[in-house]
Amino acid sequence: MADPENQKYTERAIRPLFTVDPQAKILIVGQAPGLKAEQTQKMWNDASGKKLRHWMGITPAEFYCPAKIAILPLDFYYPGRGKSGDLPPRKEFAAKWHPQLWKYLPQVKLTLLVGSYAQHFYLRQPNSTRLTTTVREYRKYLPRYFPLVHPSPLNYGWLKKNPWFENEVVSELQYRVKSVLN
């Protein structure tokens, strides 16, 4: 909160949203908290979160247990609204903060990369890399990373065009999540 780059949030008493616990076994890396998350101070507290928990095959209690699941968005603050959804996370934010917080995540066995921003950052992909290609080739990134489409209602069209995702990828995700948590 003392970082000058976050001053506009700190002045409005908005706290950074992330969860890091040394016992966490799974890390979720997404874009940035949404407006509802900012207002409630609870990440993935919307339809996207409900869908993500369903894909993972876990309960809200498991999802919000810091000793099981860490959540480290690419930006810890809601970036605002754009023409077709939320604005992207601030550039260089994750590069500044993620390495500092990874040292508090020694037990993480699986990192879910939710959406193209997370995939481009962690997989060091150029922006031209297609999300569909990365998600379809998810096995290539296992066992460390599991790339996913963002579970936003805005992506329901993508899900309809790509039924293989819910038919095969979700069951593999549930298997991996269960294996890591047990």
Image: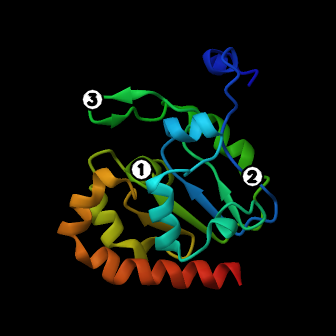
In the figure, is residue 140 to the left or right of 180? left
Closer to the camera in the image, 33 or 20: 33
Residue 77 in percent (x, y) is at 58, 32
Question: Which residue does the image show at 52% across and 73% down from the upper left?
Answer: 56
* Picture quarter with the N terminus: top right
**Callout count:** 3
Report which residue position mark 1 lands on.
120
Closer to the camera in the image, 124 or 177: 177
| Image coloring type | rainbow
The answer, for residue 42, to whether it is visible in the render is: yes
As helix, strand or loop, the secondary structure at mark 1 comes to: helix
Which numbered disc flags the more N-terminal residue, 3 or 2?
2
As helix, strand or loop, the secondary structure at mark 3 comes to: loop
Could you say which quadrant of the image residue 127 lies in? Answer: top left
| Type of amino acid under label 3 | Lys
Q: Point out the frontmost of discs 1 and 3.
A: 3
**Mark 2 crowd level (few <14, some 14–19, many ≥20, 10 Å Cα):** some
Q: Point out the frontmost of discs 3 and 2.
A: 3
As helix, strand or loop, the secondary structure at mark 2 comes to: loop
